[in-house]
Image: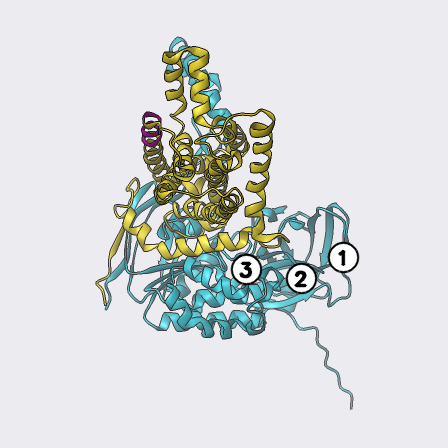
Amino acid sequence: MSDTVIHVENLSKQYVLGKNGHSDGLKHVIHDCVTAPLRWLKKTAAGTENLKINGHKAPESFWALKDVSFDIKRGEVVGIIGRNGAGKSTLLKILSRITEQTRGRVEITGRVASLLEVGTGFHPELSGRENIFLNGAILGMGRQEIRQKFDEIVAFAEVEKFLDTPVKRYSSGMYVRLAFAVAAHLEPEILIVDEVLAVGDAQFQNKCLGKMQEVSKGGRTVLFVSHNMEAVLKLCTRGILLARGSVFATGEPGKVTAIYFEDQISTAGEVDLRKKPRPLPGNGAVQLISASPVTDDKIWSYPFGQPPALQVQVEAQQAIDKIELGIGLFSARGFEVASWSSSYARSLLSLKAGLNTVQINFNDLKLLPGRYYLGLGLRSERGFEDYIPEAIWFEIVISDESARANAHTMLGTFVLNAEAKIVG
Amino acid sequence: MKAAQTLILEPGRTAKNYWRDLFHYRELFLILAWRDVIVRYKQTSAGAAWALIQPMMSILIMTLIFGGLAGLPSEHNAPYAIMVCAATLPWQFFANALSLSSQSVVSNASLISKIYFPRMIVPASSIVVSLVDFMVACSILAGLMVWYHFWPTWRLLVLPALVILAIAAALGPGLILTALTVRYRDFRMIIPFIVQFGLYVCPVAYSSTYLHDKLAAKLGTDLGEKLFLLYSLNPMVGVIDGFRWAILGGSGTFYWPGFVLSVCLTLVLLVTGILYFRKTERAFADVI
């Protein structure tokens, strides 16, 4: 069967910023009502061309999506990729009926389940058992259906012993496992998934990937947004690359991801980490604020041979001891090259209240030229504080040293610091 | 297998099957209501007893001050405490429903921005929570009746219908305030004020017959009557008078014009509330 299950036609979404946007108070409305006659008088007096002089500018707006069209056939697994702000999340939100498009038309045939976050609606005060039922219902499962799959869900999440404990006492790992387990047992005809694989430890991520593969092989249609190119390549039968709200490329995943990498331009200077997507909302007590490269020209590109270094600003609401910093180093395709944590290095951080600048040096690391990104995480004795799976992109560029070392002939991602000598 | 349905999404197209959708999501409604009920008194040491303590204290204070100190007359020859109780129960239900529902969508923001369901479920489920509190608080009335040896009449059978009226009276303004709170958080400040103010505007601590007579005595029958009719526009006046009529029994006459007016306004508010909520709910995820 190859009939179309999702048909998207000229889909556009406009957001209005500022005045009529998110943070307008009642005051403005009242003010507008009161001053309306006055403005009208001024307008008629001044003539229409001088509108802006009154300080009454047209509200600023931008198109998060612009004329997006595509068709998805039954059984396809489509990966939607693109940089932050390319419109991926907006697209998913419209397809899952959370928000309404400004223009265009969508036709969806079949039962849809959308998974824009793991653990949507989890209530910290309720026990694991209760949350399975709550979350299941939120994702669209019937009570009967949940009861049937209950044991399976519990086994998948490995939380048998803590079923009657409120989830606020769970470790963040357990929480995420339970949340994913419920979601993984959904059986819709069309599944819409946003970046859920970016959570949990590596072992659990593999388990999730396996489950996703199973789902997609079961003939279901999957729409999958991700930054993890490895996962897109592994799972998807087709890729759609969005850029600035429009479809930039579509087709075979290998081809589309290649275009995506070419499009990744390393940004200069300070990166605002507050805006980066986080899989789990932190409580804001300790937060990653920004990062800047420690290089001569302040850009995120390091010449081969120079160990990468960067500074991260961390904000703490109160002074706090024993903060553990975790770093994951990924290749551009989303493959985890290496990881490091300050607890391993026996250098837990003591933060003062306010902004702290943390310098990170990767000693002896000789990455081969190419693009990489870092994931950053913070833990305290309380547990999880903040985590950004894709925090900073940087590149290693060729240099004198790489030319001397013939770096382009080397395989892998970094140069081994090895030694060979004749000892006998 | 059922033939797959095609869902069409277009701007400005209010879901044609809104009410069927609402019915389809009934299980989510029940489970959200169940969650809200369970969570309400979690990690409080008195637990659900709070649903009793609050109305009990206000009944006690109002009886002492208005019945004892001020010496206002009761209605239908009932003990003052029972008269106050008969009004406090629906009033507390209304006040709780209003403040809980108006906060409900905002406090479920994470849900609203991540998953689709008819948004009306959220304020509706917080009305269920207030209803559960109301049921619990009804035992105070039973206790007072036993204490005063005050036995209800057949009129008590009308009570379920009046509870439905109270739900309608709370749902209408509740929906309007919920939708407004999503856009204008100013209503977070306004609602406690409305609730506090309402306690005096509604005949909770005093009887509406007393107010009626007082108005007539001070301003003359004609003007007094007109003013009282204006007063009866308040939907809660109808609900409270209904409750008193059903619970207190006795021979007092029922003020029909006021009651009919109250019910009419309740219906107007309910319809307005539903229409306004439906009009704004599509943009909740963008505005919240």
Q: Position of B162 compared to B101: left or right?
A: left
Disc on the earlier residue, 1 or 3: 3
User: Vertical placement of A142 versus A275: above or below?
Assistant: below
- Judging from the image, what secondary structure is the residue with disc 1 in? strand
Q: Which residue is mark 2?
A: A326
Asked whether residue B258 is drawn in magenta, I would say yes
Specify the farthest residue to the left.
B3
Disc on the earlier residue, 2 or 3: 3
Q: Which residue is mark 1?
A: A349
Q: Which residue is mark 3?
A: A126
Q: Position of B242 compared to A300: left or right?
A: left
Amino acid type of the residue that numbered disc 1 sits on in the rendered structure: Leu
Verify CB contact (< 8 Å) between mark 1 and mark 3.
Answer: no
Q: Which chain is yellow?
A: B
Q: Residue B82: x and y, percent?
A: 50, 38
Q: Residue at x 33, y 67 (%)?
A: A220
Decide: few, some or many residues near mark 2? Use Cα within 10 Å; few <14, some 14-19, many ≥20. some
Quarter occupied by the N terminus of chain A: bottom left
User: Vertical placement of A354 versus A340: above or below?
Assistant: above
Q: Colour of chain A?
A: cyan
The answer to whether residue A283 is seen in the rendering is: yes
In space, the residues marked 1 and 3 are separated at their CA atoms by 33 Å
Amino acid type of the residue that numbered disc 3 sits on in the rendered structure: Leu
Q: Residue B287: x and y, percent?
A: 45, 39
Q: Chain of mark 3?
A: A
Q: Nearer the viewer, mark 1 or mark 3?
A: 3
Say the numbered circle drawn on residue A388: none
